[in-house]
Amino acid sequence: MTGLREIFEEREGERRLENDPALMPPDGGIVFIGRIASPWTKRETCPKNMRAARETGQKAVLTIDAPYREGLRGLERASHVIILSWLHHAPRDLIVQKPRHAAEAKGVFSLRSPARPNPIGLHVARLVGLDQNAGRIDLDAIDVLDGTPIIDIKPYFASTDAIPEATIEGRDESDRIRR
């Protein structure tokens, strides 16, 4: 076999999926590994970001499909996780947008809007509970609509993922920690 498997050595204890996701029919160009259950059913009531979602006190649950549940092994060690989601209700043809709160239009790559060529959501959430056998991950909050597909889950590492000095020119971030 040629391709990526040749450059990754097989390690003891590893298992491969019975069906290679790369060979499956495209699901938006990727394979969805599960779905998000959230309290949000309408765009108008869905929080616009994770901070706003946490302020509601509403929890969320990820359900991982059976073939991918072994991939959850060891995730319980993480206090927080990064979730990549497919924002399936978002339009994909907007390249320049004007947010409600902005004075001028901006390109989608300078915004966090779900409307973009590849509507991938990025969420950092606190891991509240994990049941690998059931494929259930309980989170402190989420800022997506109920039923949103999951692309991937990764542990959050504060030592490498947090950049306290990061800024966006013209954005008030007075409440962030300064060093």
Image (cartoon, grey):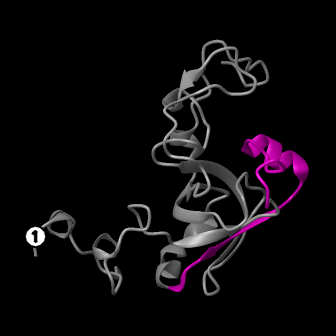
| Quarter containing the N terminus | bottom left
- In the image, residue 174 sits, relative to residue 64, either above or below, namely above
Image quadrant in which you'd find residue 48: top right
Image quadrant in which you'd find residue 172: top right
Along the line of sight, the residue nearer the viewer: 94 or 36? 94
In the image, taking residue 122 as reference, residue 95 lies left or right, namely left
- In the image, residue 128 sits, relative to residue 16, either above or below, namely above
Q: Residue furthest left?
A: 2
| Quarter containing the C terminus | top right
- In the image, residue 8 sits, relative to residue 114, either above or below, namely below
In the image, taking residue 54 as reference, residue 109 lies left or right, namely left
Mark 1 — residue?
2
Along the line of sight, the residue nearer the viewer: 53 or 148? 148
Was residue 30 drawn as part of the magenta stretch in this picture? no
Q: Disc 1 on helix, strand or loop? A: loop
Residue displayed at 63% across by 63% down: 148
Image quadrant in which you'd find residue 111: top right
Residue 131 horizontal/vertical position (percent) = 67, 80
In the image, taking residue 13 as reference, residue 97 lies left or right, namely right
What span is in magenta? Answer: 41-66
Of the residues shown, which amino acid type is indicated by label 1?
Thr
Residue 65 horizontal/vertical position (percent) = 55, 80
Residue 67 horizontal/vertical position (percent) = 47, 84
Q: How many labels does the image show?
A: 1
Residue displayed at 75% across by 23% down: 101
Residue displayed at 73% across by 21% down: 173
